[in-house]
Amino acid sequence: MNDRSPRTQLRSLARNLYRKGWMEGTAGNLSVKTNEGLYITASGYPKGSLSDEEILCIPLLESGSFSAGDRRPSAEISIHRVLYRLFPESGAVLHVHTVEAALVSDLPGQDLELPPLEVLKGLGIADPSTRPRLPVFENDLLVTDIAEKIGRRLPDPRYPLPALLIRHHGTTVWGRTLADALRHLELVEFCFRLLVTKKFLDQK
């Protein structure tokens, strides 16, 4: 991915995630951090057919409202910004909406315990048997309130995974590069599918 412009990378990834059913309609948002600023998908546009103009380049730090004509950054820009602040080594943040994420986020508790799968090593967990916990945040119409809660809670070392869940909403991951973030997304969603399948089988 590194030999292409940020806009090309984000358009291609958005199209692929749309085809997987992870960014239906206008759902979800993606960003990459560069020396120029933060490239992020515009709000309200179908992710399967984004144009270059629908990938905006905005300041990384908060600097008032921003728009390019009738295009605005994703409404969840505040979440992207707080994650880049908390994890300054990160170069990409991805947020998608999947059925499995919505289902597992409905389980009780503020954390989601992941199964002891080998794939957790791809998320930086050396010993999967530790069953790391994923933080779950309540959804809120004010996205800035969600970002504020993330900023207060995620520095806690009890959350070693580069991912979080927003209840009844979706998965957010981050990584050093866009490829790293995509790997984290795929592995976390794999864990979700296993949890959903196991819950279904246990109820039969």
Image (spheres, grey):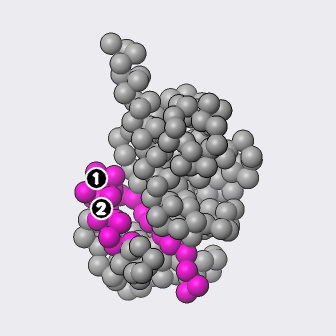
Asked if residue 29 is positioned above or below residue 185 in the image, the reply reads below
- What residue is disc 2 on? 16
Q: Quadrant location of the N terminus?
A: bottom left
Q: Residues within 10 Å of mark 1 (few under 14, many from 20)?
A: few
Q: CA distance from mark 2 to mark 1?
A: 6 Å
24 or 200, nearer to the observer: 200
Residue displayed at 38% across by 86% down: 69
Residue displayed at 42% across by 63% down: 29
At which x and y percent is residue 57? Answer: 48, 82
Give the residue type that dot 2 points to.
Answer: Asn
* Left or right: residue 23 compared with residue 61: left
- Looking at the rendered structure, which numbered label has been put on residue 20? 1
Q: What residue span does the magenta drawing correspond to?
A: 10-36
Q: Is residue 77 magenta?
A: no
Residue displayed at 28% across by 51% down: 21
Asked if residue 58 is positioned above or below residue 138 in the image, the reply reads below
Q: Is residue 29 magenta?
A: yes
Q: Are marks 2 and 1 in contact (CB under 8 Å)?
A: yes
Residue 166 seen in this snapshot: no
Label total for image? 2
| Helix, strand or loop at mark 1 | loop
